[in-house]
Every structure is written in C-alpha cells, then in structure tokens.
Image: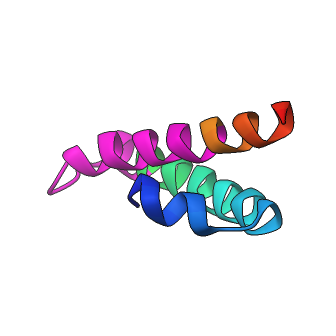
C-alpha cells in the first residue's frame, strides 16, 4: 500500500486496516515458520505496510 493511498483513508479506516494488516503479518510469519514461503519478501512488504499505517495514525494523533 502506497503512502498516497494511506493518506486518503480516514482515521477509522486506518485503524481497521492496521489491525487487518497486523493479523495478515502474524499469519504469514506463522506459515513461514512451519514451511518456507514461496516469496519471503512478502514478510518485508507487509511489515513495512504496518509501519506506514502506524506512522500515519501517530501523525494524526499529534495534530
């Protein structure tokens, strides 16, 4: 998910998307632990998306 897409979301949508993405990341990590993923770069991209969403939420809380 790109930063421009994230900025267009409302705060409620951001929180919902963050929880969904964290769950997705957790599931991917578990699957990777059991048997290696075909594309382990997925872990990095999902982790970075979680960080982008959390950062945008933090920015909005400060305003």
Q: Residue at x 74, y 69 (%)?
A: 13
Which image quadrant is residue 57 in?
A: top right
Residue 27 image position (x, y, % from top left) = 51, 55
Q: Which quadrant is the C terminus positioned in?
A: top right
Residue 40 visible, this angle: yes
Left/right of residue 40 with respect to residue 13 in the rendered view? left
Residue 39 image position (x, y, % from top left) = 16, 54
Residue 36 visible, this angle: no
Give the dominant element type of the magenta stretch: helix, strand or loop.
helix
Q: Residue at x 66, y 54 (%)?
A: 18
Q: Is-magenta flag for residue 23?
A: no
Q: Compared with residue 30, is residue 1 higher up or lower down, i.e. above or below?
A: below
Left/right of residue 1 with respect to residue 57 in the rendered view? left
Q: Residue at x 65, y 40 (%)?
A: 54
Q: Compared with residue 52, is residue 17 higher up or lower down, i.e. above or below?
A: below
Q: Is-magenta flag for residue 50?
A: yes
Left/right of residue 40 with respect to residue 47 in the rendered view? left
Q: Which residues are magenta?
A: 31-54
Which image quadrant is residue 10 in?
A: bottom right
Q: Residue at x 37, y 39 (%)?
A: 33
């Amino acid at each position: 998910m790109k930063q421009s897409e994230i900025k267009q979301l409302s705060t409620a949508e951001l929180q919902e998307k963050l929880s969904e993405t964290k769950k997705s990341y957790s599931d991917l990590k578990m699957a990777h632990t059991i048997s290696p993923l075909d594309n382990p770069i997925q872990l990095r991209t999902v982790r970075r998306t979680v960080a982008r969403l959390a950062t945008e939420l933090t920015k909005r809380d400060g305003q």
